[in-house]
C-alpha cells in the first residue's frame, strides 16, 4: 500500500476562475462540461454564457467582493451563475434550496448577501413568499435598489421568472439584451478587465455548514485553494478529459461543489448531476452518459443498487465510487479493507485520500478501516484536546490540519477564534495515525452526520422546545449503516399524561427545518429518565444509550 506522492500536483494555469474558464474553453471547447437529464453545456458555452451573464451582473452593480447568493437547484443554471459571478471577482454564496423561511432569512442576514440570483420556487419551496415573510417591507417596494431594515445588505433580487414581482428583476436571458434593471449590459471588455484583476488569493466562496451550537458557520475559501485542491484531488483519482463524474450532492455543499463539479472542470472532465435525486432516473443517466466516477454517500448507492432497474442497467464504464455497479474485475480486492477519505468544508473537502490503485490492492487486517494518507501539501497533527500536546503514533486525539487548502477563515470570526497560534485548525474530529495512515474514531462534539450532511442537535432541540407540549428535548445520533447516523429525539412531555404525538411533532418539524434535520424517531421519556451529570448537563452518552434501547424496543417501549 504505497503512500501518496510527496509533492502536491497543481495546475499550470493561474488558479483563478477566469483562467479556468478561458483555458478550459480553449482546450476542451466542444466537450460537454455539465450534463443533467434535461440539459447539457459545453466548455465553450459555459465560457460564453457566463461572460454574458457577468456583463449583466456588472450592469446591476456587482463587482469584485460583491456577495452574490445563488438560489438554484443543481444544474447548468447553477454553474453558469457561479461562473458569471466568480469571473468578475464577486464572492459566491450558495443557498441551500431546502431552507425554510426562518432559515433563509437568518442565512441571508448572516452572509450579508447583496445580490440574490435564483429561481422563484423549487419543489414545495416558494421563495418569493418566503422573502416577503422574511422582509415584509418588500411588498411596498416597486423598483430600483432595495433598502430593507430586515435585510440591510440586500440590494437586488434577480429571479428566473418571466414576470417577477415589482421588487425583483428578471433574470437576463438570450432574449433580453439589457441588464436586469433595463440599462445596457457592461461590455465584454469590462468583464475581461475585471477577470484580469482576480488573483488566487481573492475570496471565491462562502459555504455554510452547521456549527456544533446550531449557529451559522460561513466557511471562506479563495480561488487558489479551491481550484488547486480540486485539481489535485482529480489528479489523484485519475479524473481527466475522458472522465464523467456524477454526484447527487447539492452544489451548496463543498462535497458537491469541489469534489464533484470542480474536480471535473479543473481536469477537463464532465460533471453530471440531477435537480432531485431519483434512483431510476439516475441509473438511466449513468448508463446513457457512460459515467466513470460516482461521488455519493452510502444511502444513495444503496438506493441505486436496490432499484428494480439496477440489474438491467449498463454500468460497464464505472471505475470508482459505486462498487455494486462496477464489473467484478474492477472492484477492490477487499472492500472491507478499502481506504476512505476524511474531509470537511473547512479543508475544501478531503484532507486525506486514497488512490484507485491503493483501494484495489486491499490491505491487511492491520490497516482495516483506515482513511488514507494526508493529501500532499497538507500537514496533520494528533493532539490531546485538553493539553494540546502532540500524541504519539497509534494514540487517538483531536485531528489538527493546516496547509494550502485550508479555509481563509470563518465569516465574521477573527482568525484567533478559528486557528491556533501556529496556524493549525482544530477539526473537532478524533483519530490517530499508524504508519502514515489515518484512522478516524469519531467527533469530539455532538454534531450528527447524516446523509452526508451535518445536524446540530441544539438547533433541533430549540425547535422542539418551542412547542407547548414539550418540556425538555434531547437530540442524539445513532449509528446507521446507510445514513451514517440517524437523528433521534428524546422529549419529556409538558402535559400531565406523560405522552406526546411523535408523528405530529415530526410533521411540524418538517415545516420548520430542512428534511435531513427531522428526527426519524421522536420518543417520549419521563423526567426521571434524563441522565444528569454533576455539572447539571445532560449525559449525552447515556442519552444515546437510552435512545438505542427505546428504538430497539419499538413502539411498545418508545412511549411516543
Image (spheres, rainbow, N blue to C red):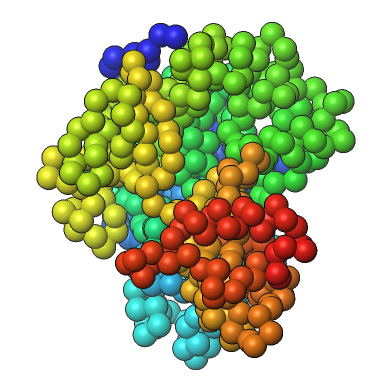
Visible in this render: residue 535? yes
Q: Quadrant of the N terminus?
A: top left
- Residue 439 at what x, y percent from top left? 41, 28
- Residue 418 at what x, y percent from top left? 23, 52
**213 or 272: which is nearer to us?**
213
* Looking at the image, residue 137 lies above or below residue 80: below
**65 or 281: which is nearer to us?**
281
**Image-based side of 179 in relation to 219, left or right:** right
Q: Which residue occupies 51% across, 30% down?
A: 264
Q: Quadrant of the C terminus?
A: bottom right
Visible in this render: residue 58? no
Q: Which residue occupies 43% across, 67% down?
A: 532
**131 or 364: which is nearer to us?**
364
Q: Which residue occupies 16% across, 54% down?
A: 416
- Residue 51 at what x, y percent from top left? 45, 47
- Residue 129 at what x, y percent from top left? 60, 79
* Looking at the image, residue 346 lies above or below residue 240: below
**Image-based side of 73 in relation to 123, left or right:** left
**Image-based side of 46 in relation to 501, left or right:** left
* Looking at the image, residue 442 lies above or below residue 210: above
The single residue placed furthest to the left in the displayed view is 421
The single residue placed furthest to the bottom in the displayed view is 140
Q: Which residue occupies 37% across, 15% down?
A: 4
Amino acid at each position: 500500500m504505497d503512500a501518496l506522492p510527496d509533492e502536491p500536483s497543481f495546475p499550470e494555469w493561474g488558479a483563478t476562475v477566469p483562467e479556468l474558464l478561458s483555458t478550459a474553453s480553449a482546450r476542451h471547447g466542444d466537450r460537454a462540461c455539465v450534463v443533467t437529464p434535461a440539459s447539457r453545456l459545453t466548455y465553450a458555452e459555459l465560457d460564453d454564457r457566463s461572460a454574458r451573464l457577468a456583463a449583466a451582473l456588472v450592469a446591476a452593480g456587482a463587482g469584485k467582493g460583491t456577495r452574490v447568493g445563488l438560489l438554484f437547484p443543481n444544474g447548468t443554471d447553477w454553474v453558469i451563475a457561479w461562473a458569471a459571478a466568480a469571473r468578475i471577482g464577486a464572492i459566491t454564496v450558495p443557498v441551500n434550496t431546502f431552507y425554510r423561511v426562518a432559515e433563509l432569512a437568518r442565512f441571508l442576514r448572516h452572509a450579508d448577501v447583496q445580490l440574490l440570483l435564483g429561481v422563484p420556487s423549487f419543489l414545495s419551496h416558494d421563495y418569493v413568499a418566503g422573502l416577503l415573510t422574511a422582509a415584509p417591507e418588500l411588498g411596498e417596494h416597486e423598483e430600483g435598489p432595495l433598502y430593507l431594515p430586515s435585510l440591510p445588505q440586500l440590494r437586488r433580487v434577480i429571479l428566473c421568472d418571466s414576470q417577477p414581482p415589482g421588487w425583483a428583476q428578471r433574470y437576463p436571458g438570450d432574449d433580453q439584451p439589457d441588464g436586469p434593471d433595463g440599462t445596457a449590459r457592461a461590455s465584454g471588455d469590462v468583464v475581461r478587465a475585471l477577470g484580469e484583476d482576480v488573483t488566487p488569493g481573492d475570496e471565491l466562496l462562502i459555504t455554510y455548514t452547521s456549527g456544533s451550537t446550531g449557529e451559522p458557520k460561513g466557511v471562506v475559501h479563495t480561488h487558489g485553494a479551491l481550484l488547486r485542491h480540486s485539481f489535485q484531488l482529480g489528479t489523484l483519482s485519475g479524473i481527466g478529459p475522458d472522465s464523467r463524474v456524477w454526484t447527487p450532492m447539492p452544489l451548496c455543499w463543498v462535497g458537491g461543489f469541489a469534489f464533484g463539479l470542480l474536480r471535473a472542470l479543473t481536469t477537463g472532465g464532465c460533471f453530471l448531476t440531477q435537480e432531485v435525486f431519483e434512483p431510476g432516473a439516475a441509473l438511466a443517466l449513468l448508463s446513457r452518459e457512460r459515467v466513470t466516477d460516482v461521488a455519493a454517500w452510502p444511502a444513495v448507492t444503496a438506493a441505486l443498487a436496490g432499484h428494480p432497474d439496477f440489474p438491467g442497467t449498463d454500468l460497464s464504464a464505472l471505475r470508482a465510487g459505486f462498487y455494486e455497479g462496477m464489473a467484478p474485475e474492477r472492484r477492490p480486492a477487499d472492500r472491507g479493507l478499502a481506504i476512505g477519505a476524511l474531509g470537511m468544508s473547512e479543508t475544501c473537502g478531503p484532507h486525506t485520500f486514497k488512490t484507485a490503485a491503493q483501494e484495489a490492492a486491499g490491505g491487511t487486517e492491520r490497516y482495516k478501516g483506515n482513511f488514507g494518507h494526508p493529501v500532499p501539501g497538507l500537514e496533520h497533527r494528533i493532539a490531546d484536546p485538553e493539553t494540546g500536546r502532540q500524541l504519539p503514533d497509534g494514540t487517538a486525539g483531536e485531528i489538527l490540519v493546516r496547509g494550502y487548502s485550508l479555509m481563509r477563515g470563518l465569516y465574521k470570526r477573527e482568525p484567533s477564534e478559528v486557528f491556533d497560534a501556529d496556524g493549525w485548525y482544530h477539526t473537532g474530529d478524533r483519530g490517530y495515525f499508524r504508519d502514515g495512515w489515518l484512522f478516524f474514531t469519531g467527533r469530539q462534539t455532538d454534531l450528527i452526520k447524516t446523509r452526508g450532511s451535518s445536524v446540530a442537535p441544539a438547533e433541533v432541540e430549540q425547535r422542539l422546545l418551542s412547542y407547548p407540549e414539550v418540556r425538555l428535548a434531547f437530540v442524539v445520533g445513532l449509528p446507521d449503516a446507510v445514513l451514517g447516523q440517524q437523528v433521534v429525539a428524546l422529549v419529556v412531555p409538558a402535559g400531565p399524561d406523560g405522552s406526546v404525538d411523535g408523528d405530529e411533532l415530526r410533521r411540524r418539524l418538517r415545516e420548520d427545518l430542512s428534511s435531513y434535520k427531522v428526527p426519524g424517531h421522536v420518543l417520549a421519556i419521563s423526567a426521571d429518565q434524563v441522565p444528569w451529570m454533576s455539572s447539571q448537563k445532560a449525559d449525552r452518552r447515556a442519552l444515546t444509550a437510552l435512545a438505542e434501547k427505546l428504538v430497539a424496543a419499538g413502539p411498545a417501549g418508545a412511549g411516543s
